[in-house]
Amino acid sequence: MSNYQFSQVNVFSKDPLGGNPLAVVHGAEKLDAAQMAALARWTNLSETTFLLPPTDPGADYRVRIFTPARELPFAGHPTLGSCHAWLSAGGRPKDAGTIVQECGAGLVRVRQDDARLEFAAPPLMRSGPLETEIREKIAQALSLDASDIAQHQWADNGPGWCAVMLRSARQVLALKPDWVALDPLKLGVIGPHDPGHDAAFEVRAFIGGAGYEDPVTGSLNASLAQWLIGAGLAPTSYVAAQGTALERAGRVHLRKIEGDIWVGGHSVEVIRGEIAL
């Protein structure tokens, strides 16, 4: 066995026990894909990442991202959490203003916004309205009337997200999905909060079939912002709440700058040590 530097980082919250945790293995060159997948199953977090030397000369580091079930080309909270862990371990970007992460989806820019890190959302791999049968499947799985779905869209930037907008955050928080009926969809649901709330929208992320709700999801919020801001359904800068139903109280900061959607949040390193594999 070999020892590897290991971090566990909480993302999208200042609270070490809020947000969404991420396991990070540093210097993982000796690990093969099967070992990485096995560790991701063992940690049983939504994602575990592995930091590697870049293969692209424009990148500062490379990351591989695993859920307990499969490898992902891109995911949001692993991007911010991995970057936080890389910087905390002494990583220094080639460009002092921007960190460039290499992942399966290509190069992703990350930068600091005050105390938060933020990444530039990658292009959508699939967009456009949901098919009628998909909308009907979602309505059935969420016990909604068709009229409850105010807007809908494919919002896939790697994980496979589709999304619906309900008429209020209260509707979003009241949802109790039928996980079997939702299979195999990865569904994001968003609804507006009343004026005066610290967040403009409430978001929930449901993984059909697995019976799993992701606490706070960077990739989903990135694609939702691309859709909603682009369609004029959201302002060019807003905060989304996610994890409320799970008592995780995450906050995702989204803004459009010169054509790019930037997705940011706080990160807190909770565990630092070594793991023997």
Image: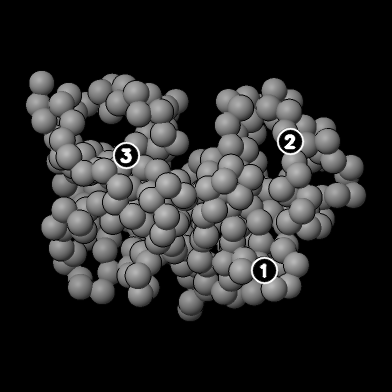
What distance separates the C-alpha of mark 2 from that of mark 3?
Answer: 28 Å
Task: Please tell me which residue lies in front, 232 or 3.
Answer: 3
**Residue at position x 61%, y 69% in the image:** 198
Give the SS element for disc 3: strand
Task: Please tell me which residue lies in front, 268 or 179.
Answer: 268
Residue placed under numbered mark 2 in the picture: 176
Which comes before the other along the chain, label 2 or label 3?
Answer: 3
Q: In which quadrant of the rendered view does residue 21 lie?
A: top left
Q: Which mark is residue 197?
A: 1
Which comes before the other along the chain, label 3 or label 1?
Answer: 3
Q: Relative to 126, is 132 above or below? A: above
Q: Nearer the viewer, mark 2 or mark 1?
A: 1
**Residue at position x 72%, y 33% in the image:** 177
**Residue at position x 37%, y 67% in the image:** 116
Give the SS element for disc 2: loop
Q: Which mark is residue 23?
A: 3
Which comes before the other along the chain, label 2 or label 1?
Answer: 2
Which amino acid type corresponds to the residue marked 3 in the rendered image?
Answer: Ala
Tell me where residue 3 appears, x and y as whole percent: 11, 30
Which amino acid type corresponds to the residue marked 1 in the rendered image?
Answer: His
Determine whether, in the image, residue 182 is placed left or right of residue 63.
Answer: right
Tell me where residue 145 appears, x and y as whole percent: 89, 42
Tell me where residue 156 appears, x and y as whole percent: 57, 47
Q: In which quadrant of the rendered view does residue 136 lie?
A: top right
